[in-house]
Image: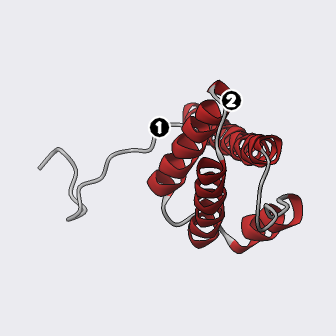
Amino acid sequence: MREPSKLIRIASMTRAMLDEARGASIDEGGRSRIADVHKRSLNELREVLSPELVEELDEVMLPISEGDVSESEIRIAQAQLIGWLEGLFHGIQASIVSQQMAAQHQLSEMQRQNKLQPPQPKVNPDGSGMYL
């Protein structure tokens, strides 16, 4: 992922558009506008996602049909995108937790190994001890 903050902004915008589409009846001009913004959002997402995620996005997302788009088509397309993005965010969170747990386990193993090793005598770099 190249620009996480851009991904979050696109997701927030898409969520707001879906909420707006659910809240009121949308005329033809509004539906056309939402369809255009939806297409642009998908293109912007393709720029910030890894190739594997772009492939997954393209596999699950169906393009909004050209021409007169119904309110239900808009709502379904927006909800699908929001659902995919939320799944992506949950996957990222799970990955972060897994990495933190692995790092914590590694640290505790290092601490345990240090406790098991006998203390090493301290030697000055010039080879002399504490006594003359």
- Residue 1 location, quadrant: bottom right
> Looking at numbered disc 2 in the image, what kind of residue is underneath it?
Arg
Compared with 126, 51 (above or below) is below
Residue 61 rendering spot, x and y as whole percentages:
82, 59
- Residue 113 location, quadrant: top right
> Looking at numbered disc 1 in the image, what kind of residue is underneath it?
Pro
Residue 108 visible in this rendered orientation of the protein: no
| Front label number (1 vs 2) | 2
Q: Residue at coordinates 66% horizontally, 50% vertically from top-left?
A: 28
Compared with 66, 72 (above or below) is above
Q: Secondary structure at mark 1?
A: loop
Upstream in sequence: badge 1 or badge 2: 2
Q: Which mark is residue 22?
A: 2
86 on left or right of 70: left
Question: What whole-number distance in Å separates the C-alpha atoms at marks 1 and 2?
Answer: 68 Å
Residue 79 rendering spot, x and y as whole percentages:
75, 40
Q: Residue at coordinates 63% horizontally, 25% vertically from top-left?
A: 23
Residue 4 rendering spot, x and y as whole percentages:
50, 55
Residue 93 rendering spot, x and y as whole percentages:
65, 38
Of 129 and 61, which appears nearest the observer?
Answer: 61
Q: Residue at coordinates 81% horizontally, 67% vertically from top-left?
A: 58
56 on left or right of 6: right
Compared with 36, 107 (above or below) is above
Q: Which mark is residue 108?
A: none
Of 25 and 117, which appears nearest the observer?
Answer: 25
- Residue 49 location, quadrant: bottom right
Task: Report which residue position mark 1 lands on.
Answer: 119
Q: Secondary structure at mark 2?
A: helix
Applied colour scheme? secondary structure
Residue 99 visible in this rendered orientation of the protein: yes
